[in-house]
Image (cartoon, helix red, strand yellow):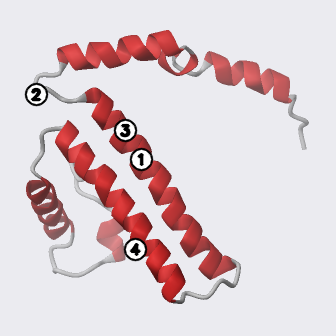
Amino acid sequence: MNKIDLNKYQDFVEEVTSDESNNSDEMARAIMRLTVQSPNDVNVSLLLTGAVGMSAEGGEFMEIVKKCIFQGKPLDEDAQFHAKRELGDIMWYWINSCRALNLDPNEVIAENVRKLEKRYPGGSFDAYYSENRQDGDL
């Protein structure tokens, strides 16, 4: 097995990381550019809040599931209550993301239903269609 020099890897990672990630001023400029160029008055600050928040809260929800499945924690009322609270937090950030993009949350869900109905033409899950998507199926 090849030894990896983590200092060299760190230098490599820095080189292949965007300026907006490496430099706060560049990130601020990117946010301002997106704010000014947005054709639909997207609230970029709120969008970033929503994206970061959903990821963080999704991790907290996953932590509950992980502990129940892999660490022997019971999936009892306390765990379910904790999961409910984290799901509520995810929804809070999701709604803020909808607000940031000026999207009606009902239309977001309706679009999701249309996407899934097209993906699964038989009306039920099929592993084949899950793995072999049509062009344009994101």
Mark before the other along the chain sequence, 2 or 1: 2
In the picture of the structure, the residue carrying the numbered disc 2 is 40
Query: Can residue 16 be seen by looking at this rendering?
Result: yes
Crowd around label 3: few <14 · some 14–19 · many ≥20 (10 Å) = some
Relative placement, left or right, of 3 versus 90 is right
Determine which quarter of the picture holds residue 63: bottom right
Mark before the other along the chain sequence, 1 or 4: 1
In the picture of the structure, the residue carrying the numbered disc 1 is 53
Residue 127 pos. (x, y %): 36, 75
Residue 93 pos. (x, y %): 32, 50
Q: Secondary structure at mark 1?
A: helix
Relative placement, left or right, of 54 versus 46 is right
Crowd around label 4: few <14 · some 14–19 · many ≥20 (10 Å) = few
Q: CA distance from mark 1 to mark 3?
A: 6 Å
In the picture of the structure, the residue carrying the numbered disc 4 is 84
Q: Nearer the viewer, residue 21 or 48?
A: 48
Q: Secondary structure at mark 2?
A: loop
Q: Secondary structure at mark 3?
A: helix
Q: CA distance from mark 2 to mark 1?
A: 22 Å
In the picture of the structure, the residue carrying the numbered disc 3 is 49
Discs 2, 1 touching: Cβ within 8 Å: no
Mark before the other along the chain sequence, 4 or 3: 3
